[in-house]
Amino acid sequence: MKIGVFDSGAGGLSVVKSLLEHHLFDEIIYYGDTARVPYGTKDKNTIIRYSLEALEFFNNFDIDLLITACNTVSAYALKEMREASSYAVTGVIEPGILALENKLEDKDAPILIIATRATVASGRYQNELREKGYTNITALQTGLFVPLVEEGIHDGPILESVMDYYFRDIDTPAAIILGCTHFPLISKVLAKYFDNTPLLIHSGEAIVEFLEREHGIKEQSYDTQLKLFASDNVDGLRKIAKEWLAE
């Protein structure tokens, strides 16, 4: 199979890493809209427009499936993308919630969602978790993590200070949903901040579970070919990919 992975920038490479580790596909076409990142600060209509324009890029390839690795796109534009495409389109929110449901049976356990402003404002995670019966949900906008990750700051005092800024009044949750694909890059520091107690829900691992469960796509023995494209500075994206995919 040949699939596409779409993200507003480089963050979706954390999803690609999981896909590569599990050898699910023959070829992955990755497109990051690096000229217009981040999407998480933009309004709904702009997010939908940008996402539909990304579909035009993928029409140049004969893909079987498109993964919208960006949580913000998954929150706002998934319906429109599905209606406009000739192939299956899946987001990361439903897989993340299913992964949580499979691992956290206590419906009253405290759950923390960290994401961009737009993803939190959409209410998608909160509403779908409530539909599943979860009662103790906190959604927090943590957009400052995105530029830090983009700058290669994955640990150290600056990141720890930002975490203290966001989390100093937050009790240790039972689970944290990493509602932005940049956040797995800081997951070790995040876990340490909460004494390695919470269950972390990572979009990449969640989508792997989802693809196997919902689409019957299983791990193979072959190596996957990855092709990287960007709307701006593709060399920069390739540099980030070399670093992140090797971690």
Image: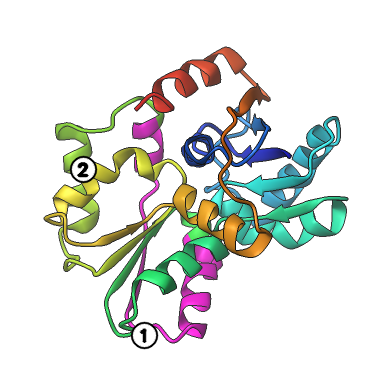
Q: Is 24 rendered above or below residue 30?
A: below
Q: Is 234 or 223 nearer to us in this picture?
A: 223
Magenta range is 120-149
For badge 1, the amino acid type reads Thr
Q: Is 225 rendered above or below residue 51?
A: above
Callout 1 environment at 10 Å: few (<14), some (14 to 19), or many (20+)?
some
Q: Note whether residue 199 is visible.
A: yes
Quarter of the image that includes the C terminus: top left
Rendered image: mark on residue 147: none
x then y, percent, for residue 132 = 48, 83
Task: Give the farthest residue toward the top.
Answer: 235
x then y, percent, for residue 35 = 63, 27
Look at the numbered disc 1 and give the secondary structure of its residue.
loop
- The answer to whether residue 193 is left or right of residue 150 is left
Rendered image: mark on residue 189: 2
Callout 2 environment at 10 Å: few (<14), some (14 to 19), or many (20+)?
some
In magenta segment, residue 151: no
- The answer to whether residue 167 is left or right of residue 245 is left
Q: Note whether residue 144 is visible.
A: no
Which residue: 49% across, 37% down? 11
Which residue: 47% across, 36% down? 21
Q: Can you identify the residue that label 1 sits on?
A: 135
